[in-house]
Image (spheres, rainbow, N blue to C red):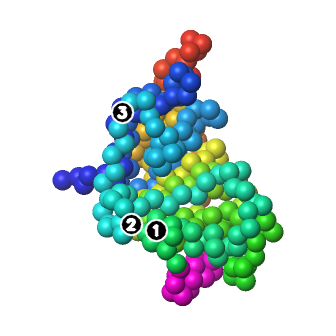
Amino acid sequence: MEKTPLIEIKSLNVGYDSRTVLHDVNLNVRERDFLGIIGPNGGGKTTLVRCILGLLTPQSGQIIFHPRRPNHVRQGLSIGYLPQYTSIDRKFPISVQEVILSGLGSVKGMVARFTDQDCRLAQQVAQRMGLSGLEHRSIGTLSGGQLQRTLLGRAVISDPEVIILDEPSTYLDRHFEAQLYQLLADLNHQCAIILVSHDIGTVLRQVKSIACVNGTLDYHPDTGITAEWLERNFQCPIDLLGHGDLPHRVLGRHIHHSNEDGNESN
């Protein structure tokens, strides 16, 4: 019997100023899922993430959380979040270690004092992120890639059940980008991961399943295909093809609802 998902989204409708951005979205995120969310700018990827995080109230529908682990501060699912780089105020006077430690707020409470053990854990996380020796540096002095690694450290320090990453590789150098995806593969043994990205080729090589978001949501539970499949179905419509060391991956055609201008998007 299949387990209840960690996140259950049912008939979700979301909009701003009487304009519907997402309509009739249904999605389940299960334990140790590695879900990639792709779609065009303005298609609703970030809107969906904001709803999952509780930062945006939908017009209708439900998002139901089914936590497996006890949360010491509140009832609910523990979620680590790596926001887009542009949402961070780099002028705020805070160090790398303090940023990473702030990720413990969901389990300790925002006014709790951090212990020596917490600080040692933050140092271990910083080392894992390739930030050794930078723990006491102000975030304003960091490169874009170093800041992204700091924010990822904040997202993972609390050992969450789900990690959401919004365009994580935007400012990462190529050397650490490879380390990032290896780290995510390791983390995926303990938690579910939701990866939002415009870098479709990278997403297709890394994730286990795909959600295409463009007003509606089309879910692809398995994007892996074989050479035999390609030979047999090469004449079939193909929208996306990812290349890399892993087997080719493909998404079949799907039709979205017409938008307000009457145009149909694929």
Q: Mark yes or no: residue 206 visible.
A: no
Mark 1: secondary structure: loop
In magenta stretch: residue 184? no
- Amino acid, disc 3: Gly
Q: Quadrant of the C terminus?
A: top right
Given residues 219 and 10, the one toward you in this image is: 10
Mark 2: secondary structure: loop
Given residues 89 and 157, the one toward you in this image is: 89
In magenta stretch: residue 115? yes
Range shown magenta = 114-130
- Amino acid, disc 2: Val
- Residue at image location 41% in from the left, 56% down from the top: 33
Q: CA distance from mark 1 to mark 3?
A: 30 Å
Residue picked out by circle 1: 109
Circle nearer the N terminus (1, 2): 2
**Which x, y percent locates residue 19?**
54, 22
Residue picked out by circle 2: 73
Residue picked out by circle 3: 61
Tell me the quarter of the picture where residue 98 sits: bottom right
Q: Residue furthest front?
A: 111
Tell me the quarter of the picture where residue 128 sits: bottom right
Q: Would you place residue 111 above or below residue 16 in this image?
A: below
Foreground tag (1 vs 3): 1
